[in-house]
Image (cartoon, rainbow, N blue to C red):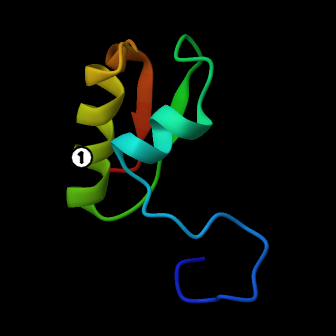
Amino acid sequence: MTGDNSSKLAAERVGKAFVSKHVTDLDQRFYLCGHDAMVFDLRGALEALGADVSSVTWEK
């Protein structure tokens, strides 16, 4: 919801800092959906933070 200042939802860019701040369980399964560059970046962020990226699912 990055363009809606009145929203009560998180308005942060979803990346490594967002994951570090909001995700407490890196042992869970993750499903990524978005454009290829974003999915690639998030997969890398999850891996850098210690998540098992072999269990990451994403749209192809």
Instruction: Give the labeled residue for mark 1.
Output: 41
Q: Residue at x 44, y 33 (%)?
A: 57
Q: Residue at x 65, y 63 (%)?
A: 10
Of the pair 25 and 39, the residue shown nearer to us: 25
Provide the secondary structure element on which disc 1 rests. Answer: helix
In the rendered structure, the answer to whether residue 37 lies left or right of residue 46 reads left
Q: Residue at x 31, y 50 (%)?
A: 39
Amino acid type assigned to the residue bearing label 1 in the image: Asp
Image quadrant of residue 44? top left
Q: x and y percent of residue 9 in the render?
A: 73, 67
Q: Residue at x 53, y 79 (%)?
A: 2
For residue 24, above or below residue 1: above
In the rendered structure, the answer to whether residue 28 lies left or right of residue 15 reads right
Q: x and y percent of residue 52 in the render?
A: 38, 12
Q: How many marks?
A: 1
Q: Residues within 10 Å of mark 1 (few under 14, many from 20)?
A: some
For residue 55, above or below residue 58: above
For residue 8, above or below residue 60: below
Q: x and y percent of residue 17 in the render?
A: 40, 43
Q: x and y percent of residue 45 in the render?
A: 29, 34
Q: Residue furthest right?
A: 8
Quarter occupied by the N terminus: bottom right
For residue 38, above or below residue 9: above
Of the pair 13 and 33, the residue shown nearer to us: 13
